[in-house]
Amino acid sequence: RTKSKGKQPPIYRVLLHNDNVNRRDYVVKVLMRVIDGYTMEDAVNVMQEAHMNGLALVTACAQETAEEYCEQLRGAGLIASLEPDGGGGGSS
């Protein structure tokens, strides 16, 4: 059994912020286009969570991929941000 001893790449969270500009169906389409493996159900859930709470977790993945997703979401006119997945953040 070989366990790779290489350092794991840091995991980052891609967050979608609510905005009052983009139509909901557009947000769903963008999420499905940009995020690998996203289904209609995934996209609708994230869009609704962002709409209700102002913010939603889109995905957590390696930093490089997360940055790419964030850039593509922003390029499509959505408001997205990144944060390191520290697992022990001080927020309640």
Image: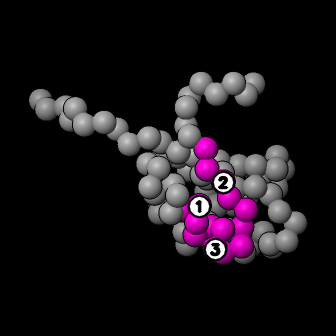
Confirm or deny contact between disc 2 and disc 1 (CB under 8 A): yes
Q: Compared with residue 61, is residue 18 higher up or lower down, i.e. above or below?
A: below
Secondary structure state at the residue bearing disc 1 = helix
Confirm or deny contact between disc 1 and disc 3 (CB under 8 A): no
Provide the residue designation for mark 1: 70
Q: Compared with residue 57, is residue 27 higher up or lower down, i.e. above or below?
A: below
For the record, the magenta segment spans: 69-83
Secondary structure state at the residue bearing disc 3 = helix
Q: Image quadrant of residue 25?
A: bottom right
Upstream in sequence: badge 2 or badge 1: 1
- The answer to which of 87 and 29 lies nearer the viewer is 87
Question: Is residue 41 shown to the viewer in this render?
Answer: no
Residue density around tag 2, few if under 14, some if 14–19, many if 20 or more, within 10 Å: some
Q: Give the position of the C terminus as an image quadrant.
A: top right
Q: Position of residue 31 (x, y in %)?
A: 61, 66
Q: Residue at x 47, y 50 (%)?
A: 63
Q: How far is the residue under mark 3 from the one under mark 2?
A: 12 Å
- The answer to which of 7 and 92 lies nearer the viewer is 7
Specify whether residue 81 is painted magenta. yes
Q: Compared with residue 58, is residue 23 higher up or lower down, i.e. above or below?
A: below
